[in-house]
Image: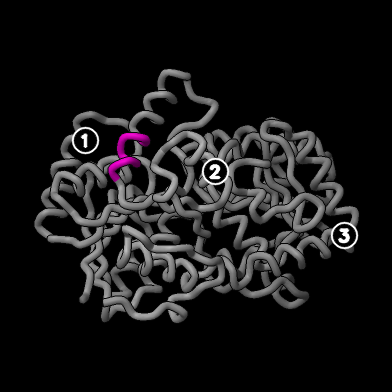
């Protein structure tokens, strides 16, 4: 039987959008008919359409809380879900996870799946707001068929908070594309793309320029590092871009920091980075970190959520506390000054990531969850959809 699946996501971009698309691409088109219902999107939405998936944009589905937009988006989603007579509604991200699951439950959709890429609540929110978010997630989680948590850290937090019955929470990995390994040739080509001056090392990060990603801590770490031979590069855009560029100039990094905005060629650029540094305040399992490790770039990141799933201190990279730029500077300097040690960790990190975080692995999980949601059984990391017997 061919299942009709509606994938609902607030913004079809960045990590969550990439995971949603790669999961859909891994499914057998003869057995699954996937439609994307999105609030907005960039090149990932264009790619989904180019791959032959049906898409619908719901302008009222916005990330921020907006009672009028939220009511309109819920009605639009309910109409689309009921009209599409979907067998499965699979939601991603906080707002789509709330409104999409409400619409699916309202429409009587048999299987309702939500992927936790992280949480809409975090320690930096006012306590009443955080409590309200947790209460909403608990209510919806108990009415969902399955919660898929990206990374063991996210899954453990979901269990601790009682966001769903424990048998309905499953740990999955993010999915990233195959990327070229970092070697002499790819590094030289990437440095040409980045226009890196001779003799300079590159410390880079990929992510949206917003509060979660803490770009100001990245700048503070570069300033504390105080090395004229280090160029800071941020790949990504967002609401804080102008502020970040002003701050870079104010702390003396005007000639040693560049923000390159969103780029479609991340895989070609990453080999030119000597140390990947991610200062996020909170995360799920960031695809940008997985991509850097898959390429073979030595990595430093904050010890949040599921980051330690892949970044094992001293083994596959270095971890630092949140909000401690001086500690991040020290870790960056350690890797820059000890290239043999940095390369050892980078190689171990690449071996940990490559082959483990793929669309095929994610597709195997989706097959089990979509087809036999009541008792899907254990899902082994490394299983691919080709390992699964066809379901009736």
The first of marks 1 and 3 along the sequence is 1
Q: Which residue is mark 1?
A: 69
Circle 2 Cα neighbour tier, 10 Å, few/some/many (<14 / 14–19 / ≥20):
some
Residue 390: image location, x then y, percent = 34, 80
Mark identifier at residue 212: none
Any part of residue 295 in sight: yes
- Which residue lies at the image location 76% right of the left edge and 65% below the top edge? 348
- Which residue lies at the image location 51% right of the left edge and 31% below the top edge? 122
Circle 1 Cα neighbour tier, 10 Å, few/some/many (<14 / 14–19 / ≥20):
some
In the structure shown, which secondary structural element does the residue marked by tag 2 occupy? helix
The first of marks 3 and 2 along the sequence is 2
Quadrant for the C terminus, please: bottom left
Distance between mark 2 and mark 1 Cα atoms: 33 Å
Image-based side of 337 in relation to 160, left or right: right
In the structure shown, which secondary structural element does the residue marked by tag 1 occupy? helix
Of the pair 276 and 195, the residue shown nearer to us: 276
The first of marks 2 and 1 along the sequence is 1
Task: Give the magenta part as a residue range.
Answer: 137-143
Q: Mark 3 and mark 2 in contact? Answer it, CB < 8 Å.
A: no
Residue 181: image location, x then y, percent = 68, 74
Image-based side of 382 in relation to 346, left or right: left
Quadrant of the rendered structure where residue 49 is?
bottom left
Quadrant for the N terminus, please: bottom left
Quadrant of the rendered structure where residue 369 is?
bottom left
Q: Which residue is mark 2?
A: 156
Distance between mark 1 and mark 3 Cα atoms: 52 Å
């Amino acid at each position: 039987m061919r299942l009709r699946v509606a994938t609902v996501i607030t913004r079809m971009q960045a990590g969550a959008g990439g995971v949603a698309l790669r999961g859909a691409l891994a499914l057998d088109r003869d057995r699954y008919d996937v439609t994307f219902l999105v609030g907005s999107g960039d090149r990932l939405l264009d790619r989904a359409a180019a791959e032959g998936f049906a898409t619908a944009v719901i302008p009222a589905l916005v990330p921020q809380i907006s009672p009028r937009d939220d009511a309109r988006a819920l009605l639009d989603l309910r109409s689309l879900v009921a009209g599409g007579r979907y067998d499965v509604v699979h939601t991603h991200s906080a707002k789509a996870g709330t409104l999409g699951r409400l619409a699916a439950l309202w429409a009587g959709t048999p299987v309702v799946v939500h992927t936790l890429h992280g949480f809409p609540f975090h320690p930096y929110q006012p306590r009443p707001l955080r409590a309200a978010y947790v209460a909403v997630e608990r209510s919806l989680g108990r009415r969902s068929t399955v919660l898929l948590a990206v990374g063991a850290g996210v899954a453990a937090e979901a269990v601790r908070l009682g966001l769903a019955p424990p048998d309905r929470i499953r740990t999955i990995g993010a999915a990233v594309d195959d990327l070229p390994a970092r070697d002499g040739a790819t590094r030289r080509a990437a440095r040409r793309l980045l226009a890196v001056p001779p003799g300079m090392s590159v410390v880079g990060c990929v992510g949206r320029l917003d509060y979660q990603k803490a770009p100001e801590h990245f700048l503070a770490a570069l300033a504390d590092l105080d090395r004229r031979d280090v160029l800071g590069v941020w790949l990504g855009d967002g609401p804080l871009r102008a502020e970040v560029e002003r701050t870079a100039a104010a702390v003396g990094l005007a000639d040693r920091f560049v923000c390159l905005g969103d780029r479609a060629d991340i895989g070609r650029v990453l080999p030119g980075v000597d140390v990947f540094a991610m200062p996020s305040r909170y995360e799920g399992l960031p695809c940008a970190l997985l991509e850097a490790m898959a390429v073979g770039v030595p990595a430093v990141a904050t010890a949040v959520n599921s980051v330690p799933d892949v970044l094992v201190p001293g083994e596959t990279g270095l971890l630092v506390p949140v909000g401690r730029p001086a500690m991040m500077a020290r870790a960056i300097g350690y890797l820059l000054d000890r290239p043999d040690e940095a390369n050892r960790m980078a190689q171990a990190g690449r071996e940990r990531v490559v082959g483990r975080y793929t669309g095929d692995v994610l597709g195997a999980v989706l097959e089990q969850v979509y087809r036999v949601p009541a008792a899907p059984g254990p899902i082994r990391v490394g299983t691919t959809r080709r390992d699964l017997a066809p379901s009736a």
